[in-house]
Image: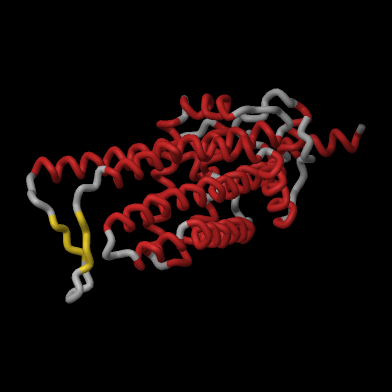
């Protein structure tokens, strides 16, 4: 059984469990986050190394001008192809890191050991479904943000557990979004605090790991060699920031998902009655099960 008691948590307890789980399994979560994103970093550094154009700052216009010896349609298509490959690599890395972290949290939170390889192994069969979950989530958020900031933030809070719901309950893209919307009803404020803490930590890490190199780039703008060096270091700093901070939000979202199920569907009682079947979709009559279980316990 889990070493963490399954019970409704306050927002403070939820965040405390997030950081405790992260700290106790630091190597596991860093490995899940870092290994896929090493491919992204390698691609970025190779792209920088293959850059042949020399950019300088024009004193009169303060804009970059590219001194290139030739221009061809083949070169343009090559650049576009390079960008497409970069997007594909980033998406795959993101899906593996997110899915692997959710599966790892599920195992650890419910008292079972897991490894980086096992977490990635479970993600492989869910990549396509997870891609569409993330795609539709971003689509909904993008449309919401078109109606000003507040609706977008509200939808981000209501959809913050769609990935855990999709992976742990085997739901499709639309069903996972609806499931998240149902679970987070009356809990958008708690979700907002989780997202706010993540944003604060993220910007603090960017300030620490990447901003100094950005300043160095501006100060060395007339020296292309130094610009490339500082750019490479900034990419490494961004990698470190992303790898260290991203698991916090994913872990918190997964724990938040379990907390919502405990609060609304008596997931703790379901687990007690059937500890081997904890990843199945919650029954539609979860409230009825909770009430019936409580009456049975009282009668006993």
Location of the N terminus by quadrant is top right
Q: Nearer the viewer, residue 120 or 130?
A: 120
Q: Position of residue 9 (x, y in %)?
A: 74, 51
Residue furthest to the right in view is 300
**Residue 181 x %, y %:** 54, 49
The quadrant holding residue 113 is top right
Residue in the image at 67% along x and 38% along y: 25
Is residue 150 among what the camera can see?
A: yes
Which residue: 46% across, 52% down?
A: 238
Nearest to the observer: residue 298 or residue 146: 146
Quadrant placement of the C terminus: top right
**Residue 186, visible in the rendered structure:** no
Q: Position of residue 92 (x, y in %)?
A: 40, 36
Residue 152 horizontal side relative to residue 165, left or right = left
Q: How many numbered circles does the render carry? A: 0
Front in this rendered view, residue 4 or 41: 41
Residue 116: horizontal and vertical position, in percent?
Answer: 58, 29
| 247 to the left or right of 5 | left
> On the picture, is 95 further left or further right than 101?
left
Occupied quadrant, residue 11: bottom right
Residue drawn at 28 percent across, 61 percent down: 223
């Amino acid at each position: 059984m889990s070493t963490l008691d399954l019970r409704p948590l306050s927002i403070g307890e939820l965040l405390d469990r997030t950081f405790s789980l992260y700290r106790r399994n630091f190597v596991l979560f860093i490995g899940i986050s870092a290994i896929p994103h090493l491919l992204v970093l390698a691609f970025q550094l190779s792209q920088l190394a293959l850059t042949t154009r020399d950019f300088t700052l024009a004193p009169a216009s303060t804009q970059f001008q590219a001194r290139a010896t030739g221009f061809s349609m083949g070169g343009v298509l090559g650049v576009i192809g390079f960008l497409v490959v970069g997007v594909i690599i980033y998406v795959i890395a993101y899906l593996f890191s997110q899915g692997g972290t959710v599966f790892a949290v599920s195992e650890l939170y419910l008292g079972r050991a897991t490894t980086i390889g096992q977490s990635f192994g479970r993600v492989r069969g869910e990549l396509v479904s997870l891609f569409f979950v993330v795609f539709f989530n971003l689509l909904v958020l993008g449309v919401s943000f078109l109606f000003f900031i507040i609706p977008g933030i509200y939808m981000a809070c209501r959809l913050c557990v769609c990935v855990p719901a999709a992976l742990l309950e085997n739901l499709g893209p639309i069903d996972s979004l609806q499931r998240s919307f149902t679970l987070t009803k009356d809990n958008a404020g708690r979700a907002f605090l989780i997202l706010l803490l993540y944003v604060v930590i993220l910007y603090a890490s960017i300030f620490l790991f990447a901003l100094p190199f950005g300043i160095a780039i501006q100060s060395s703008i007339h020296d292309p060699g130094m610009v490339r060096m500082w750019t490479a270091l900034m990419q490494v700093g961004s990698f470190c920031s992303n790898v260290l901070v991203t698991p916090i939000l994913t872990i918190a979202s997964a724990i938040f998902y379990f907390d919502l199920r405990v609060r609304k569907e008596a997931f703790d009682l379901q687990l007690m009655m059937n500890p081997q079947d904890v990843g199945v979709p919650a029954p539609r009559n979860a409230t009825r099960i909770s009430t019936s279980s409580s009456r049975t316990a009282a009668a006993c």
